[in-house]
Image (cartoon, rainbow, N blue to C red):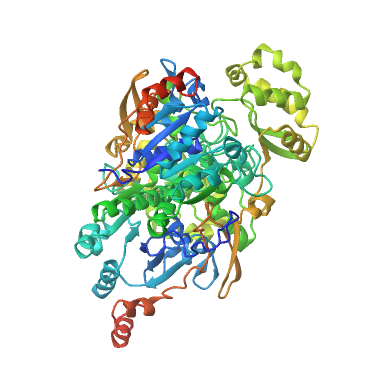
Amino acid sequence: MKPLQGLRVIDLTQAMAAPFCTMNLADMGAEVIKVEAPGEGESMRQLGRAQKNGHSGTFMTMNRNKRSLAVDLKQPEGVELIRRLAKTADVFVQNYRPGVAGRLGVDFESLQKINSRLVYCAISGFGNTGPYAPRGGYDLIAQGMSGVISVTGEENGPPAKAGIPLADLAAGLFGAYGILAALEHRERTGEGQLVDTSLLEAAMALTVWESSEYWLTGGVPKPMGSAHRLGAPYQALRAADGYFTVGAGSDKLFAAFCGVLGLSNRKFEKRKDRMANRPALIAEIEKITVTKSRAAWLAALEKAGVPAGPINNYAEALADPHTLAREMVVDLQHPGAGAIKALGVPVKLSETPGAVERAAPLLGEHTAEILKELCYSETEERALRAKGVVQ
Amino acid sequence: MVSPAKTAPGAATKGALEGLRVIDQTQVMAGPFCSMLLADLGADVIKVEPREGEHTRQERQIAPGVSASFLAVNRNKRGMAIDLKKKEGIEILKRLAATADVLVENYRPGVAQRLGVDYGTLREINPKLIYCSISGFGQTGPYASRGGFDLIAQGMSGIMSATGSEGGAPVKVGVPITDLGAGLFAVFGILCAVRARRLTGRGQFVDTSLFEAGLALSAWEATEYWYTGDLPKPLGTAHRLSAPYQAFRASDGTFTVGAGNNKLWGLFAGLLGLEGLLQDERFKKPKDRLQNRAALEKLIEEITSRKPRAHWLERCEAAGIPAGPIYSIPEALADPQAQARGMTQEYDYPGVGRVRTLGNPVKMSRSPARLYKAPPALGEDNEALLSSLGYSEEEILELKEKNVIP
């Protein structure tokens, strides 16, 4: 049994943020129906170099464990189909620009009339309200406008964003949080509701520490490379053969770190002295760390209980024994792409664990079975197919 | 919190998670962020601290017993201070656990066992309890016993290898993304377990980590590597799969533009007066632009660097091209959209005065997130909670005398 078993989710989403939201729900057992346009399907199916036998890796990554229904929402029969589906659903997720769902007739107000228990989640660039609501927004724009870029990168270096699309991914996770909470509310009251979040708000919510620092101390947080705003040493350090990370910002861990290095810590015994003289501190430390290899330091630091680690590239990270022990890499079979790899479920539930069991669907792979579930007759199905309403 | 989404008349005001009691035995960032998200939606979160308080209270204090880091992630919670190294302290925690739905902790694996407040022990007392552990690497696997910070997890999960400038020094994501990601996955896991409990009648153990959160947030980069064999590298602000999608220099700073697809690229080139490039073989298709990104960037910046950011942003908006400023934290917070979405909230904190805090990023129409309580003073709710657990006044006094509580 999976925790979200029995939950039906209609997924009218594209690209990254919202598909990631519904993917997490699907991993936990929700029945997610991905609705795509006939013909080419969602745009991600066409995107990019990451392909296998003509199937987009990016699409497959975000849409595993889902079923696919190909339906044309520009035809009235298509909208009718979605409305029939919405009557049977618990959750509806879309990431259109605000206004588009209304034009299509699948906005919150319309669907709530036919299913008052529906939890309707909209994930957009800036949210459904406010002056920028109609604008399109991408991860990059949200990273820039939330302040995330302003605190990322080398000191005095060119702007750098988080290398991962964190505004997209966080918006997806905040969406999942809002949906599950809204389902709890529904358990008590019987009513569905609108859950509305955005890339901008998600990215801002991730500046929780930096905004608090600014508000309470007045200092404007700046990029610090790999270093920490409040503790040192807590950053990447140079070894003979490259960099490794060490987090020894507390007085206790710093003392242990000095023990490993054979460094006298008298000058820098107190956290505030280390912070005030960080460049000098790091210079003294690196004088020693450059004399040995990363592996040598990491082994010694592990023995001393000082948190430290390599800076892995993705080949290393995905092959790391701990990654494998935690089942973070899963093998799947895709009907077109063959054997593929996927990331596992990062949160482990002991009794009702989630799982990655099914590769992403082919376009319209489940159209027939979903039509049958909605009691469309074979004659009706043929007519819909002939008109290009479904595929 | 006031939600900009319309709140229907008669809507519930207590929050979607009203009635869920959460024991929050967490410190620093990942765990407190997780329980704060539950508290924002009305869960009764009781933060249990050591007698001297969690150590972020002491870091760069702005008033006695309180710091910016502490205030950032502990709103809407009640507070208890208990010495869990004393058996009387453990007894309090056990009695509290008997009344709770959820417990969240972020000790290093093994510490909860030593204290006698591990899942196995508490499940005996309360089989419906959902027990969530957030650690550096998770409860199993070769690195389970290691301490892990955000920096370590960013390095080991691959995130640092894809962040920063090409050929530059190692850079991490400036916000503690694996802490916050682990907090979010923990919330997700807890709410899944709450739902499962309706079906099974039982609680369970929920186990996540900074390291796994870092990997899960690398979905795109892992895919890139698995499908192409290429290792994702730091690209500054640029995109792995499309161009132009990055920051560009204006005469007075930088701004971002996302115009990677052919349609948006056509509009952007037109706006810059670079229509000629649309026929240029180097930039015709998305993959051509990606391949010749450096050349494209140079040609674009020759134009953008002549006028200020505001000029370009206005024109991009008029043309419908996603674009935006690169804000500092204060600029981001002051932006009209952030204000309209209620992203700044305020409360009073004794000894500090008016304190601002971020709004919840999720707007719910019928059970909105709210700010209803300032972060707790150390042990603020000790007496109220102890008497609700059946401790008499004499017993409470005795606990104080024995230094179990402050």
Closer to the camera in the image, A134 or B102: A134
Counting from the top left corner in percent of width and height, residue A44 is at 50, 26
Q: Is residue B123 visible?
A: yes
- The picture quadrant where one finds residue A391 is top left
- The picture quadrant where one finds residue A102 is top right
- Going 50% across and 47% down the picture, which residue do you hit? A112
On screen, residue B208 versus residue A91, left or right, reads left
**Direction bottom: furthest residue:** B394
**Direction right: furthest residue:** B306
Closer to the camera in the image, A132 or B375: A132
Q: Is residue A290 visible?
A: no
Closer to the camera in the image, A255 or B343: B343
Number of numbered tags placed on the structure image: 0
**Direction left: furthest residue:** B124
On screen, residue A38 versus residue A256, left or right, reads right
Closer to the camera in the image, A388 or B136: A388
Counting from the top left corner in percent of width and height, residue B84 is at 30, 69
Counting from the top left corner in percent of width and height, residue B79 is at 41, 71
Quadrant in which the N terminus of chain A is drawn: top left
- The picture quadrant where one finds residue B326 is top right
**Relative to A133, residue B53 above or below:** below
**Relative to B1, residue B184 above or below:** above
On screen, residue A40 versus residue B326, left or right, reads left
Counting from the top left corner in percent of width and height, residue B206 is at 30, 51
**Relative to A150, residue B58 above or below:** below
